[in-house]
């Protein structure tokens, strides 16, 4: 995938008012996730995976939880997630866009 234009892609629904699209090389993946169901009164359930993750808050505000520790983040902020560490977000605004990168590839996202 040399280039990907948002206007040309079909986004995958991952929940009510939540969608993602992605691109990848052999070793690195970038995923754009749009959340349109905020603000929320509770964080999403924590999850973990064996992938390293670096994320960028492109729009909106969240509370990011890493191993239960909260940090409020907004546009321009970033966070990292080591492999197998529980993490989650709570949406503070009506729209949030996160740009996530993963290595190795999230094979569960490709299909």
Image: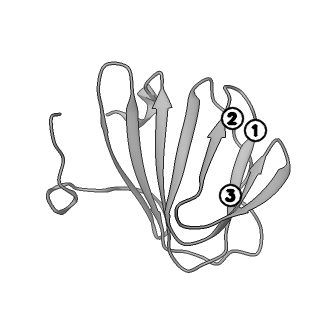
**Front-most of 20 and 65?**
65
- Does label 1 or label 2 sit earlier along the sequence? 2
Q: Which residue is mark 3?
A: 89
Give SS at disc 3.
strand
Q: CA distance from mark 1 to mark 3?
A: 11 Å
In the figure, 39 relative to 98: above or below?
Answer: below
Query: Residue 83: horizontal and vertical position, in percent?
Result: 66, 25
Q: How is the image coloured?
A: one colour
Total marks drawn? 3
Q: To which quarter of the image does residue 81 belong?
A: top right
- Mark positioned earlier in the residue sequence (2 or 3): 2
Q: Residue at x 60, y 67 (%)?
A: 74
Callout 1 touching callout 2 (CB < 8 Å): yes
**Disc 1 target residue:** 86
What secondary structure is found at the residue carrying circle 1? loop
From the top left corner, tell me how far across and down residue 88 is, in percent.
Answer: 70, 51
Q: Quadrant of the N terminus?
A: top left
Numbered label attached to residue 20: none
Left or right for 45, reference 21: right
Q: Which residue is mark 2?
A: 48
Distance (Cα) linking label 2 and label 3: 12 Å
């Amino acid at each position: 995938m040399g280039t990907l234009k948002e206007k040309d892609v079909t986004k995958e629904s991952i929940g009510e008012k939540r969608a993602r699209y992605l691109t990848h090389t052999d070793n690195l993946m970038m995923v754009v996730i749009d959340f349109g169901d905020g603000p929320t009164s509770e964080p999403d359930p924590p999850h973990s995976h064996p992938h390293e993750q670096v994320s960028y808050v492109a729009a909106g505000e969240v509370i990011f939880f890493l191993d239960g520790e909260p940090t409020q983040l907004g546009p321009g902020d970033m966070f990292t997630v080591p492999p197998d560490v529980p993490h989650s977000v709570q949406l503070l605004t009506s729209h949030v866009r996160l740009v996530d990168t993963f290595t190795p590839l999230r094979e569960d996202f490709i299909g």
